[in-house]
């Protein structure tokens, strides 16, 4: 299921990916809408080049990438049959939680205390007001993910035997293109080199620790199993996305639409999330900032991921990601 069969449209004249000929070493690739790819190790004469290394000198290399995309005389390969890996190997992964208005409201309703006597309608009205207040008076909520959870955009996702409530969470991921620390909101998007698709899988049964409730959420357990963050297929340069706060996110499971929302529904903008992260952490080239997931998760519908389920994730201008779920086999 991993090989490219049909190139889904993406915005702009090119995108970046990490690809390989079957059973060969992967390489950073420049992908164009015509369905062809240029091995950048050869084109730039850098045998050890990685996609992350491109972001370490993004401002300098971007004009060269544009020129290569428009030059048909290069040693272009057909994408058909190539293996597609996660487009970048980040050093750091930052994940925003509860950052879509309707998603946050639905989750608050599901997890509200048993002694909450309000009707669903009353609770929803109160939460609408709370989201208004939060967007003005509060800050984004961000936690840390593990790079080891990342897998390719067409790879099978292995559901661990211990995961009792595996769920999907489609997210727009910003890819950092320069070292950055303590950015203002106005400066934040200047350090975003591009965007890609992430599916931040979560085992809902493992979020809260019953043995130590005062410690809160267990993000390590519920989100960081190997392969729990399918990424890609491509990184599209930020300049090709006219307005990242106005793109559509759609996730289907077995052909049925589950998530279908615009980034307009974010409580905190992409710039606000990136700025907030940078106030504490020094952002590095190739790092990922996941910006939250919209409403439509499986837990809201009483549907959880099972063996054989196929997820198809689309974000406007970024292409399509397809992954199949397989349950972990007992050894």
Image: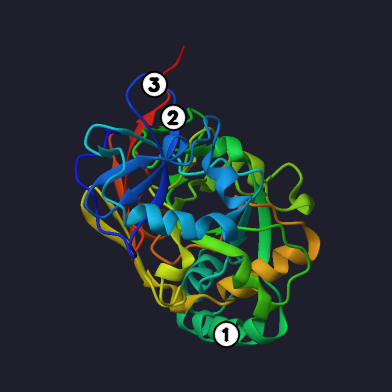
Which mark, residue 26? 2
Quadrant of residue 84 within the rendered picture? top left
Which marked residue is nearer to the observer: mark 2 or mark 1? 2
The numbered mark, 2 or 1, whose residue comes first in the sequence reads 2
- Residues 284 and 154: in front is 284
Q: Position of residue 277 (x, y in %)?
A: 71, 63
Secondary structure beneath dot 1 equals helix
Q: Position of residue 201 (x, y in %)?
A: 48, 47
Q: Position of residue 50 (x, y in %)?
A: 54, 38
How many residues crowd mark 1 within 10 Å: few (<14), some (14–19), many (20+)? Answer: few
Q: How is the image coloured?
A: rainbow
Secondary structure beneath dot 2 equals loop
User: Disc 1 versus disc 3: distance between alpha carbons?
Assistant: 56 Å
How many numbered marks appear?
Answer: 3
The outermost residue toward the top is 331
Q: Which residue is mark 3?
A: 24
Does residue 48 appear to the left or right of 27 in the view shown? right
Q: Are marks 2 and 3 in contact (CB under 8 Å)?
A: yes
Residue occupying image coordinates x 72% and y 53%: 216
Judge whether 62 appears above or below 242 on screen.
above
Judge whether 44 appears above or below 327 on screen.
below
Q: Is residue 24 visible?
A: yes
> Which quarter of the figure is the N terminus placed in?
top left
Judge whether 10 appears above or below 245 on screen.
above
Which mark, residue 126? 1
The numbered mark, 1 or 3, whose residue comes first in the sequence reads 3
User: Disc 2 versus disc 1: distance between alpha carbons?
Assistant: 51 Å
Secondary structure beneath dot 3 equals loop
């Amino acid at each position: 299921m991993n090989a490219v069969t049909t190139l889904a449209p993406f915005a702009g004249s090119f995108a970046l990916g990490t690809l390989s000929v079957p059973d060969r070493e992967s390489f950073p690739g420049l992908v164009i809408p015509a369905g062809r790819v240029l091995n950048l190790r050869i084109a730039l004469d850098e045998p050890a080049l990685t996609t992350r290394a491109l972001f370490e000198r993004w401002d300098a290399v971007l004009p060269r990438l544009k020129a290569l995309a428009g030059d048909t005389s290069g040693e272009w390969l057909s994408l058909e049959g190539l293996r597609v890996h996660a487009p970048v190997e980040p050093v750091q992964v930052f994940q925003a939680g509860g950052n879509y208005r309707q998603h946050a409201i639905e989750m608050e309703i599901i997890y509200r205390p048993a002694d909450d006597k309000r009707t669903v309608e009353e609770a929803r009205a109160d939460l609408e007001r709370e989201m208004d207040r939060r967007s003005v008076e509060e800050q984004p909520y961000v936690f840390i993910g593990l790079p080891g959870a990342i897998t390719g955009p067409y790879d099978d996702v292995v559901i661990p035997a211990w995961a009792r409530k595996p769920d999907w969470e489609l997210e727009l991921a910003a890819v950092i293109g320069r070292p950055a620390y303590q950015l203002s909101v106005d400066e934040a998007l200047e350090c975003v080199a591009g965007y890609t698709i992430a599916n931040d899988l979560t085992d809902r049964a493992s979020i809260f620790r019953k043995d130590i409730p005062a410690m809160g959420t267990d993000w390590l357990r519920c989100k960081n199993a190997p392969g729990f963050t399918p990424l890609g297929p491509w990184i599209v340069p930020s300049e090709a996305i006219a307005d990242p706060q106005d793109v559509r996110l759609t996730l289907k499971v077995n052909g049925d639409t589950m998530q279908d929302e615009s980034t307009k529904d974010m409580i905190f903008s992409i710039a606000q999330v990136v700025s907030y992260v940078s106030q504490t952490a020094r952002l590095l080239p190739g790092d990922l900032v996941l910006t939250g997931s919209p409403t439509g998760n499986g837990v809201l519908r009483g549907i959880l991921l099972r063996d054989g389920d196929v997820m198809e994730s689309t974000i406007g201008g970024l292409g399509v990601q397809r992954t199949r779920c397989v349950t972990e086999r007992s050894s």
